[in-house]
Amino acid sequence: MPQLRLALNQIDSSVGDLAGNSDTIVRWARHSADQGAHLIAFPEMALTGYPVEDLALRSSFVEASRSALTALAARLADEGLGDIPVVVGYLDRSEQAQPRYGQPAGAPSNAAAVLHAGGVVLTFAKHHLPNYGVFDEFRYFVPGSTLPVVRVRGVDVALAICEDLWQDGGRVPAAREAGAGLLLSINASPYEMAKDDTRLDLVRRRAKEAGCTLAYLAMIGGQDELVFDGDSIVVSGDGEVITRAPQFEEGCVLVDLELPAAGEVPSGTAGDGLRIDHRVVSAEPLEAYEPQVPGEHAPRMDDDEEIYTALVVGLRAYLRKNGFGSVLLGLSGGIDSALVAAIAADAVGAGNVHAVSMPSRYSSGHSKDDAAEMARRTGLNYRAVPIGSMFDSYMKALRLTGLAEENLQARLRGVTLMGISNQEGHLVLATGNKSELACGYSTLYGDAVGGFAPIKDVLKTKVWDLARWRNAAALRGGQTPPIPENSITKPPSAELRPGQMDSDSLPDYELLDRVLDLYVQQDLGRDAIVAAGFDAETVNRILRMVDTAEYKRRQYPPGTKITSKGFGKDRRLPITNRWREGS
């Protein structure tokens, strides 16, 4: 059977950086060629970055993408790489689509191209367009209607883009009908917990349906609230894993494959009426060679390591791509700010993390000590700015009481952080977790201030899990655990009044998070949650808090998404909303 050395490049693209992304593609194409690759692939929309959102509706950006693709093809040839076909994702527009109501203006398409010999030899658009969760691709793109097949070294390679695998029908069964020896899918599928297992099951199943080897190439890095975990996979036609790439690592995955020889050039239609668009790049198979790159299986991360790494990668990408070199946060001595400080130190280095302790009259001695100990353990920059005199001045002028008095302290801390940020140029990190955000247990313009919120999609119980994991990982590496044990074990408190505990305002976090999982993640109603064995009064209380806090969540900073239902694009509810579960 013909042989083919395939290069799958897990790269991190930046949205809108056509020149920088082109440089990255050329650099990794050269690396792939140096390793003897016969076919080189890059992820979905690697040239433009993903997702481009409403940039897809801007004709100037679409045309810039098309021009950059043509220039990239010429550059690859100029740099001696023109003999190897390169598959790359980009933003295109349909030449055939007629303007009509409900179709995105300009008929943009989520497309990919095969570049060879200095030109663009084949283009195609994503056939299945996702329109759920964070995806709005019906808003932005028109679907493709072809099955693209390119013949490389005597092997017919069918091509697909991301959702083409996730939905039934379309290009997967069409690849079987066309007699493809390899189905190559390029992807920009965002990370969420446990998705790696789902992805592996999907790829195995689709390979069997296509009746051929399947290569699934994924992006890495981060874009706003999304993070991409790589984890590219190649499986045989019977679903056996040939190779699996590392998670969250940029790099080139090489594998030598033996694939069925191409037969007659396929034509006509296949699958769901897809027109077969076939191109021949190199018809003759390679002379037989001894495979040098057998399939390898990268070690898998456990669940907490995977989540923690996603949070680090997401924060690092947001900072780097938006021009921030340092961060600032309030370090209270509690578990949330301690975890955020650890994530930040791992993302950008402790020397670029600036932490501020802002004690008030209600701050406990152990909280101040724990914050200082965290700074000592990690080496981050640390200062104390007491807010007592500021608080007294405000109270003298305003004479606030009760909740207004409590929230004033949080707002003074927010003002302090933003002032230092303006003065010194650090990005402020909000330290709230998903449980608090769900219930509105935060102060607008207080602890909710910031430019990014690393753990906004992390439930409180998972915060503790991640803190314990990070300390254990440090011990395994012979390092000092970054988070003081007292920050993990002491009862959580906002310390805005004497003796205050989170349990004064919220149910026990173990119980709360289980209800939030059912209500927020799984979209179950009140009756179904009660039927699952939860106390009706407690459920009513939690749901009421969640429903009435939507206005706060809309004003919270962006943060890395790690679940299937993060607050934001995943879960879109009206602020003005009188519907109440069970009412």
Image (spheres, grey):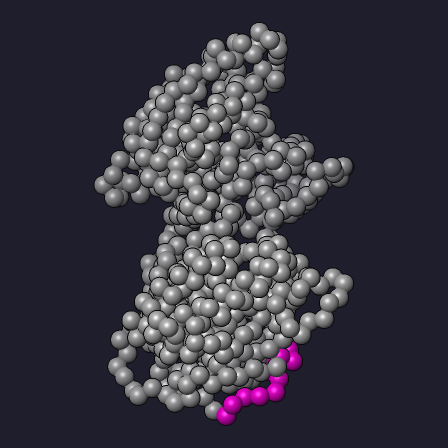
The residue nearer to you, when weighing 390 against 324, is 324
- Residue 69, position in %: x, y? 49, 68
Q: Is residue 379 above or below residue 60?
A: above
Residue in view at x 44 percent, y 27 percent: 423
Q: Say if residue 110 shows up in the picture.
A: no
Q: Would you say 554 lies left or right of 574 here?
A: left
Residue span colored magenta: 264-274
Residue in view at x 46 percent, y 64 percent: 43
Q: Would you say 546 lies left or right of 352 here?
A: right
Q: Is residue 525 above or below residue 105?
A: above
Quadrant of the image occupied by residue 273: bottom right
Q: Say if residue 69 shows up in the picture.
A: yes
The residue nearer to you, when weighing 253 against 581, is 253
Quadrant of the image occupied by residue 557: top right
Residue 91 sits inside the magenta stretch: no
Residue 266 sits inside the magenta stretch: yes
The residue nearer to you, when weighing 353 against 128, is 353
